[in-house]
Image: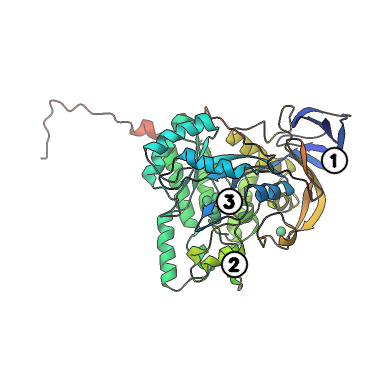
Amino acid sequence: MTKVIKNGTIVTADLTYKADVLIEDGVITEIGTGLSGDEELDATGCYVMPGGIDPHTHLEMPFMGTYSSDDFESGTRAGLAGGTTMVVDFALPNPGESLLDALKRWDNKSTRANCDYSFHMAVTWWGEQVFDDMKTVVETRGINTFKHFMAYKGALMVNDDEMYASFQRLAELGGIAMVHAENGDVVAELSAKLLAEGNTGPEAHAYSRPPQVEGEATNRAIMIADMAGVPLYVVHTSCEESHEAIRRARMQGKRVWGEPLIQHLTLDDSEYMNADWDHAARRVMSPPFRNKQHQDSLWAGLQSGSLSVVATDHCAFTTEQKRYGVGDFTKIPNGTGGLEDRMPMLWTHGVATGRLTPNEFVAVTSTNIAKILNCYPKKGAVLVGADADLVVWDPEKTKVISAGTQQSAIDYNVFEGHEVKGLPRYTLTRGQVAVVDGEIKTQEGHGKFVEREANTVVNKALSTWKELTAPRPVDRSGIPATGV
Ligand code: DUC
Ligand code: ZN
Ligand code: ZN
Ligand code: ZN
């Protein structure tokens, strides 16, 4: 049984051209004109693009005394509705737990996924077991990305000595280090001070995590990564201070990537000043929303290429869960949704406004991250032999985002009321049509795990630190010590 997508314009990170796409057994088998197949999908007036990859989700994650409310079923259904055909979630070990046991828990949750997925491994504690497990994870589980939380003191946070040890191990294994870059010690101090002064509302969350804590941690992570000789991926880059550090590192030839979120690109910190506690708390995430100047910096980074990927950090909590933090903002579960809205919002505010070309849109929503994660061109490409993870994108189709019509399991949407122009006509996951004009035809359990091999390219050649500080003992034999 073959399928053909006819009469569309193919848009990849590099090229725009008219052609049909033939699909068989979930894979693209031919690209050309005048193709026919058993089933035809009409793409007249549409762009045929690689499906989106969201490399930053937290589905059914145990966090801050609860679990995030979208699981692999509702989360991937939401993604597909918005043109995303692969997600990468973070497997989080409990303190003392082996990385492999944590992965088993994530394996169990992900059996319900509607689209393909992969995992990043989080390093939440350090010891010989973790050191050993890292090799097994890379070599037998097809995971080459390891995340380090520099914040969430007393919970997920790792200290610099642990981070340096882990980064060195990753350099040996051909892995990529990822960081949640916020100075967790300073955040803890600021939070305690704000609470002591009576600032208990959700707006204080933003005051407790100013851009400086993110800029400091980003700079620190970049320097530690350089000393270890490991490539570094900075998740949820939200402000100029962090972007500036990434920009500078890249100019110096360091392999460092930055990932702004669609929320930080399109929503700002005035949301926290809303008189409605629920409204503000629903938008509490880390890092918090920033002001317009920071948003401009992030857009400029996408345009110039200093920032590489747009993600969501999808971590959805219901209003009821958010209310755990009434009277103490530090207890509001951190996180917002975005899986369904990332692609339409970025098209509307990026491509339709002339900030990004359609090719750049494909690069930052799919191709760049497929290359970084080492799953290109299986994912992120419209090429013969690639998985038929495709979105037939109608640039004229509009809707108003509303919790009432969304796929996510929560009871609100941070983009409520935003009109988007640019939506999927069809979303295909390995050749299977999962969405037709907003109608959901997903199949629970269709998603498969995507293995990603270690990278052969590490930053050893770029690290100047080792040469400059390598021990060079001086021979002082025969010369008496003076000044004693
Ligand atoms: N930030 C959030 O807002 N939620 C999940 C974890 C994180 O770093
Ligand atoms: Zn984070
Ligand atoms: Zn996250
Ligand atoms: Zn809008």
Q: Separation of disc 2 and disc 3 at Cα?
A: 23 Å
Q: Earlier in the sequence, mark 2 or mark 3?
A: 3
Amino acid on which the number 2 mark rests in the picture:
Ala
Indicate the position of residue 130 as horizontal and vertical percent values.
42, 38
Front-most of residues 84 and 381: 84
Q: Earlier in the sequence, mark 3 or mark 1?
A: 1
Q: Earlier in the sequence, mark 2 or mark 1?
A: 1
What is the number of the mark on residue 60? 3
The 10 Å Cα crowd at callout 2, few under 14, some 14 to 19, many 20 or more, is many
| Scheme of image coloration | rainbow
Residue wearing tag 1 = 43
Among the 4 quarters of the image, the one containing residue 118: top right
Q: Secondary structure at mark 1?
A: loop
User: Quick check: can you spot residue 167?
Assistant: yes
Indicate the position of residue 444 as horizontal and vertical percent values.
70, 44
Circle 3/circle 1 CB separation < 8 Å: no
